[in-house]
Image: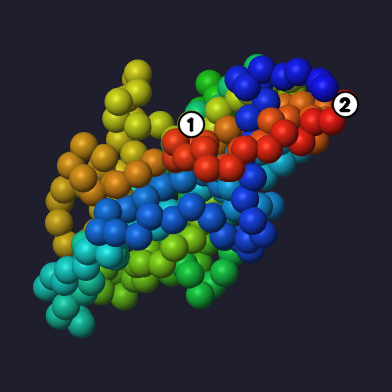
Amino acid sequence: MRRLTISAAIVVVFGLVSPATAQITHPGDAVHVQIYNPDDGSNVFCVAPGNTFHARVFVEPGQNGTTCVLSCSPPSVPGGQANLATGVVDVAFDTSRLSYVADSIISNPATPAVQGMPQEQNLADGRIGWALAGTWSTPGNPGSTLMSPCDMTFLNTDGWLFQVEFQAVGSGIAALHLRRETDTPPFALSFADICGTEAFKESNGGIGSVTDGTVLIDSDCANVLFFDSFEDGAVARWSNASTD
């Protein structure tokens, strides 16, 4: 039997899921953010050297909704973690193992609230971001004007925010890391509604969980040790797919 160290051969096995949906969800009052694989819904990727793959940033708004009164009509607009108006996300990647190819945002006119802007200015340093500043009057077009807070659509349903295509370089394990306040240098991974001035962050409980992505670069993804829900600390089922 081929022997592989666990640190070099980790892949999570999940059941069949929709390719557009992250499988791990955390319903609750707080916001949840994760990087997921659109092929299987997991938070891990296995790719051969030289091949490309897509990673998506997925956000679940919280279930804590409020309303506020603004000086426009209608008089009441939704707020709270369940109705997000702005946000900033930054993904760090290992440039020695992953090469950026392209990025995209969801292009559904029915969900303009998630049509923020990819931030590509830090690609050379191994970072790509996404920013939401409201709702564009022309969905997905940052050259158009922003709609008023009383007319805009809020991020209030689960969905992916933006997608990044990478090419695998070399071999080994690489992280797709959602940067946080605790990183050095820190990053204010955060969201906000239209009603208050305080952002929803991990430090104030507004963001409940943040899940990174793990990329295994290997020429033979069948010859790895598989187990379920490693990133959540659960090891209920183990199986070894290697037979050689």
Above or below for 102 versus 137: above
Answer left or right for 121 relative to 68: right
Q: Which picture quadrant has residue 126? A: top right
Q: Residues within 10 Å of mark 2 (few under 14, many from 20)?
A: few
Please state which amino acid type lies under the numbered disc 1.
His
In the depicted view, which residue is nearer to us: 242 or 152? 242
State which mark lies toward you, 1 or 2. 2
In the depicted view, which residue is nearer to us: 163 or 31? 31
Residue 49 screen position, x and y as percent: 79, 26
Q: Where is mark 2, residue-wise? A: 244
Whether residue 147 is visible, yes or no, is: no
**Residue in the image at 13% along x and 70% along y:** 68
Residue 93 screen position, x and y as percent: 56, 27
Please report whichever mark, 1 or 2, sits nearer to the chain's N-terminal start. 1
The circle on residue 177 is 1
**Residue in the image at 63% along x and 61% along y:** 17
Whether residue 60 is visible, yes or no, is: yes
The circle on residue 212 is none
**Residue in the image at 67% along x and 59% along y:** 16
Answer left or right for 235 relative to 39: left
How far apart marks 1 and 2 lie (CA) works out to: 33 Å
Above or below for 77 versus 14: below
Answer left or right for 52 relative to 189: right
Q: Tell me the SS state at disc 2.
A: loop
